[in-house]
Image (cartoon, coloured by chain):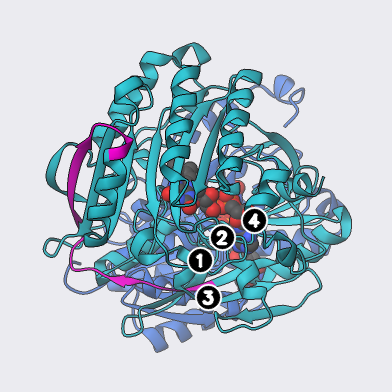
Amino acid sequence: MSHSPLRVLILGATSGIAEVTARLYAAEGARLVLAGRNAARLQAIAADLRLRGASAVDIAQIDFVRDDARQAWLGLLATHGAFDHVLIAYGVLGDQPTAEQDSAAAESIMAANFTSPAQWSLAVAEDFERRGSGSLVVLGSVAGDRGRRANYVYGAAKAGIAALIEGIAHRFAGKGPRAVVVKPGPTDTPMTAGMKKGGPLWATAEQVAVIVRRAADKGGPVQYAPARWRLVMLIVRLIPSAIFNKMNL
Amino acid sequence: MTGFVDTDQLVSWGRVLRARHDLARPAFLDELPALLHAGAASTGKVLAGGLRRSYGDSCLNADGALIDVSALDRFIAFDPATRLLTAEAGVSLAQVLACAIPRGFFLPVTPGTKFVTLGGAVANDVHGKNHHGAGTFGRWVRALTLLRSDGSHRELTPEDESGLFAATIGGLGLTGVIATVTVELQPISSSHMATETIPFANLGEFFRLARDSDAAHAYSVAWIDCLASGDDLGRGLLTLADHAAEGPLEVAGRQGPSIPFDFPEIALNRYSIAAFNRLYHYAGAAKAGRRVVSYDPYFYPLDAIRNWNRLYGRRGMYQYQSLVPPEAAPEATREMLRTIARAGTGSFLAVLKTFGAVASPGLLSFPREGTTLALDFPNRGPETLALLSRLDAIVREAKGRLYPAKDGRLPPDLFHAGYPAAERFAQHVDPGISSSFWRRMQS
Ligand SMILES: Cc1cc2nc3c(=O)[nH]c(=O)nc-3n(C[C@H](O)[C@H](O)[C@H](O)COP(=O)(O)OP(=O)(O)OC[C@H]3O[C@@H](n4cnc5c(N)ncnc54)[C@H](O)[C@@H]3O)c2cc1C
Ligand SMILES: NC(=O)c1ccc[n+]([C@@H]2O[C@H](COP(=O)([O-])OP(=O)(O)OC[C@H]3O[C@@H](n4cnc5c(N)ncnc54)[C@H](OP(=O)(O)O)[C@@H]3O)[C@@H](O)[C@H]2O)c1
């Protein structure tokens, strides 16, 4: 690894968490491919990462909900060759009340947070398994650990992607490649731009990015960011519904 | 208002003022025009801000909109041949150093903290310990892009004849939102500093030493023991420094401890002030004699303790930075130190520096030829304000000026007396933009 630079693909590279993670890779001298739908923003990020030490940065314009995952993936492999790490970071929070009434709104939350990343993960897994190496890291969420009225459509999609990645990790066991779902708690990024932040629940994108970067190299198939969320969510899952129902979450 | 969040109790670095703002923190440059428009349209006053390392009210816009640009922190280009670095205005000086040092470059001018954005460095036309040779930060700015609340977008260079470039350098954010900055870096062959520290027994000796030795060194600054009085008045240490000719090109990576909460005020007394003074002193390069140290403890001793401003307790602190012209400097400086010693409240840090004759490019730039004295005072209410007014009288008499970046109470008449170009400057102020400081100066 110290000889040839790490080849890294980031899907949803304009995400707040993804960009900070990309800076960690850049500082290691990695070769990066940044995929997303906003080409101008990807270009700005690419120029920055080059000055932060990346040995090469390319961009790929992809709409993950609209475009077919397997075809796009094969296109990336044909253009760039194999990848050592793939990070799936895109997602949308959506609006829960709208999703309850409008099936198209519900559909787009499910597509961006489950259907699409699931298809991408399956396509990447096939390649990694064949090669016997590669790290797939996907961003889930603590919201997937227990459904709650504020965001359960989003939460359900995140629960789905977590189960899928756990399954891929199980499939990979003993074969070389890795698959990890990282579940952040509330993080200060554009996704949460309209919310009041601060206090002990909130993490910075930098804190989460360090865990995301490390997850590609070591640790179990389910990781929390920051790590204390593992215990918090264990407790949250154990709260009896009679009490949970009275909590304003 | 889309993109803004109602935020109360926003503080600047001095932590004296707390104010409500509609706060936005865009992640991409392309979001700026809409935010600027929305902020100006709905509150009638919007301001851009960086890392809020200004102590007073110039980086606040109470009950108005504040666009925090610190997440606009992408490098755009660097050309080692021309030494020109172009970056988004929210890039911090710490990030510039991390990018520049391994390539053999350094900031042309740096203030005493690296947690300052490029936009903030421009808007206060910041100075450093090399002012006597290099002048201000703004002298090294080769281009700016500026967004105005009417939706226009200006590329400004030092050759600009409209006056907008000169108004924006040191313009306290009032002429528009600075989106990108192009600055010329200086080449270095090592990230180490060769320093020499010379004790002086009183102010007279300081002025002699500074006059005789500044020219031969890139950097020079003095630390004054504010608790000394009588014959020892103005006792201190002068530190001269240059970038070392040999050594590694290493980015300092140390992350010091953080002050997690406001210290109780009882923790702050004559003894802790003295102890802090010593700590500062030793953390820096300020032991008598010659030493070679990393650039980081030399330029940024306070950065080693994150949120050190919380040491001053919940009521916060005042910085007081004055500048008096050369002819008045010895007497005015002596008088200020005497006044402080008499008040007996002490100052955590007292820093003295001679500014050179290099002209500053901004209409409102603080630096000009003379002597600058920077002081920190814990906020003890009326008692502290009374002391600062006594210092004001000395500065006024000496035809000096105060630094708006440091001060949340600078009286309007002293501002206007100190900055005769303020009227010309006002013509360039963006009508959609304002700040707490600017409104106070109009009243
Ligand atoms: C420990 C310490 C040491 C210091 N030492 C020095 C020193 O040696 N010399 C010195 O000169 N200063 C010094 N300062 C002051 C500091 O350098 C200035 O206050 C600097 O401007 C702070 O930059 P910032 O990014 O925090 O901006 P802020 O404090 O957030 O804002 C400062 C001003 O810049 C404007 N501004 C910021 N970004 C933009 C933008 N993108 N577009 C338009 N306007 C903008 C704001 O409106 C405001 O008027 C020191 C401060 C500290 C805390
Ligand atoms: N922030 C949090 O509190 C938090 C907490 C837990 C989990 N997470 C998860 O962490 C991941 C990263 O989130 P973040 O906070 O960094 O969010 P973010 O900054 O809002 O980024 C989300 C990214 O997803 C991209 N995207 C969405 N739909 C897309 C599509 N159809 N095609 C292409 N790109 C698309 C967006 O691209 P555009 O710029 O083009 O819109 C955006 O860059 C997400 O999966 C999120 O669910 C976040």
Q: Position of residue B124 (x, y in %)?
A: 56, 57
Q: Position of residue B417 (x, y in %)?
A: 67, 50
**Distance from the alpha carbon under mark 2 to that under mark 1:** 6 Å
The residue closer to the viewer here, B164 or B145, is B164
Which residue is denoted by mark 4 in the rendering?
A: B419
Which residue is at the far bottom?
A79
The residue closer to the viewer here, B417 or A152, is B417
**Distance from the alpha carbon under mark 3 to that under mark 2:** 32 Å
Which residue is denoted by mark 1 in the rendering?
A: B360
Figure quadrant of the C terminus of chain B:
top right
Mark sitting earlier along the chain (4/2): 2
* Dots 4, 1 in contact, CB < 8 A: no
Q: Nearer the viewer, mark 1 or mark 3?
A: 1
Q: Tell me the kind of residue under disc 3.
A: Ala
Q: Nearer the viewer, mark 4 or mark 3?
A: 4
Residue A44 is marked as 3
State the residue at coordinates (26%, 42%): B238
> Within 10 Å of the Cα at label 3, are there few (<14), some (14-19), or many (20+) other Cα atoms?
some
> Within 10 Å of the Cα at label 4, are there few (<14), some (14-19), or many (20+) other Cα atoms?
some
Q: Which residues are magenta?
A: B181-204
Q: Position of residue B315 (x, y in %)?
A: 60, 23
| Chain coloured blue in the rendered structure | A
Q: Quick check: A113 left or right of B258?
A: right
Asked if labels 4 and 2 share a chain, the reply is yes
